[in-house]
Image (cartoon, rainbow, N blue to C red):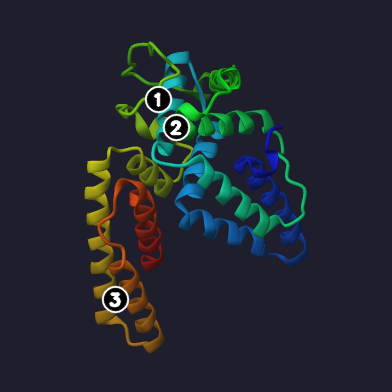
Amino acid sequence: MRDISYNFGAIRDSILKLSASEIIKESKSNTLNSFMDMVKKNSILHKQHLIFKNLQESKTFDKDRLAERFLNQNLQLFSNESWEKILAENKKIRRELLDDNHVEAKKDGKLFESINIMIESITKGPRFTEHEKEQEAYEFIISHLTRPVISESDKSKEVNDSPKLNNAWKFITKIAISNFNERFKHLNESEKNTFKILISDNATKTNYFKAIKQENFNLIDTKLKEEKDVHVIDLLNTFKAKLDNIKEVNYLSLDESIISCLELKERLNK
């Protein structure tokens, strides 16, 4: 497989395999904890976590056009990302957590490579020239999303179907989200919320960023009024200072700022 050592899906599978061995030996896994912490805090890793989980675990679709819409909706996560930055983050997490360990997908290697190719094609734009591989990757993912299932109940059904896409190769910048909970039921509530925000238009994301930033400020101020422990108060003030340093951002750094605020909110609510 091409660049399998830096494919996020293969890296994730290899980390899970290593973590399982650590848990058997020590009843815990520092590697897995570090991985989850890095994914929560890093927007590029977080987006890859969402798309790989979505495409690997989604229930199947009855029609190709539903699968096409689902795939394009997921690819929308990467509209403002750089392939070079994605590759750099994957190399970094592989080096820090796996060192010289062999990196290989457990079972869905072809799917992971196809996802990787589609992300590369979206983020490189006109610089991506391997169109035959792009087409094969697209068709493989659609085939995976429409594969036969044993039970009809395992299919993802949508009642408000849209017309068939006229050109499946063009990146769709605006897609109506219908039957969202059904389509993304494999995600937990936090992941659903994050995904929904990250595929929104920049105006919606900007307003959400301002709202969640203020929400975090309010949470911190409430905790500061109630807290007596000096060490906790210092920590809360550190959070507040970091939050204050997240100023108005342009669209290139907007996703990163949103994910930082979401991660902080999760910590504050524990």
Which quadrant would the C terminus be assigned to in this image? bottom left
Q: Position of residue 3 (x, y in %)?
A: 68, 38
Q: Earlier in the sequence, mark 3 or mark 1?
A: 1
What label sits on residue 171 in the rendered view?
A: 1
Q: Position of residue 187 (x, y in %)?
A: 46, 41
Q: Position of residue 134 (x, y in %)?
A: 56, 22
Q: Name the residue that disc number 3 marks.
A: 223
Give the side of residue 203 with respect to residue 71, left or right: left
Q: Crowding at label 3, few (<14), some or many (≥20) Cα neighbours within 10 Å?
A: some
Q: Name the residue that disc number 2 marks.
A: 75
Is 25 situated above or below 132? below
Which one is in front in this view, the residue at disc 3 or the one at disc 1?
1
Is 212 situated above or below 223? above
Give the side of residue 265 with respect to residue 212, left or right: right
Q: Crowding at label 1, few (<14), some or many (≥20) Cα neighbours within 10 Å?
A: some
Residue for point 35% across, 70% down: 242
Return the residue nearer the eye: 237 or 247: 247
In what element is the residue under mark 1?
Answer: loop
Which quadrant would the N terminus be assigned to in this image? top right
- Disc 2 from disc 3: Cα separation: 39 Å
Is 104 situated above or below 56? below
Q: Are marks 2 and 3 in contact (CB under 8 Å)?
A: no
Q: Tag 2: residue type?
A: Leu
In what element is the residue under mark 3?
Answer: helix
Which one is in front in this view, the residue at disc 2 or the one at disc 3?
2
Would residue 63 be seen by someone viewing this image from the given angle?
A: no
Q: Position of residue 70 (x, y in %)?
A: 43, 26
Q: Tag 3: residue type?
A: Lys
Q: Name the image quarter holding residue 195.
A: top left
Residue for point 43% across, 38% down: 78
Q: Earlier in the sequence, mark 2 or mark 3?
A: 2
